[in-house]
Amino acid sequence: ITREYPVAWSKGDEPYYPVNNSENNQLFTKYRSLAKEKVPQVAFGGRLGLYRYYNMDQVIAAALQFLNGDFFGNTSK
């Protein structure tokens, strides 16, 4: 479990939120493919794991959807 405290970003800081542009999305796709190949037993989630901006309600819904589908193998809702 980690905690983050949003602040205004400036050069040299660690970014907390995905910056969705073509270059970054291509890099994410490359990393996701590499992760599936090298560590298929690891599930990545959340803002940084899925490279999406989520509000708290959205990330909880995504986690529940993952658990009900991929994790437990039940694709019904």
Image: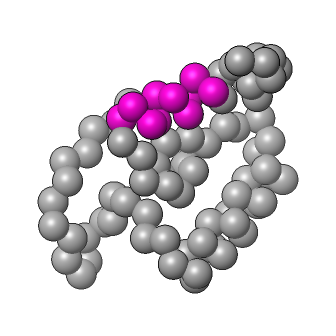
Residue 57 in the image: above or below residue 45: above
Q: Which residues are magenta?
A: 56-65
Q: Relative to the observer, which residue lies in front, 74 or 71? A: 74
Residue 6: say if magenta.
no
Q: Is residue 60 magenta?
A: yes
Q: Quadrant of the N terminus?
A: top left
Number of marks in picture: 0
Q: Main secondary structure of the magenta part?
A: helix
Q: Quadrant of the C terminus?
A: top right
Q: Is residue 52 above or below residue 59?
A: below
* 65 to the left or right of 4: right
- Residue 39 rendering spot, x and y as whole percentages: 76, 45
Q: Position of residue 56 (x, y in %)?
A: 36, 35
Query: In which image quadrant can residue 55 be found?
Result: top left
Please tell me which residue is depicted at 27% across the width and 38% down the height of the picture.
3
Position in image of residue 61 (x %, y %)? 51, 29
- Residue furthest toward the left? 7
Residue 12 position, x and y percent, is: 25, 77
Instruction: Tell me if residue 19 comes above or below residue 51 in the rendering.
Output: below
| Residue lying at 66% horizontally and 22% vertically, measured from the top left | 67
Question: Furthest-front residue in view?
Answer: 77
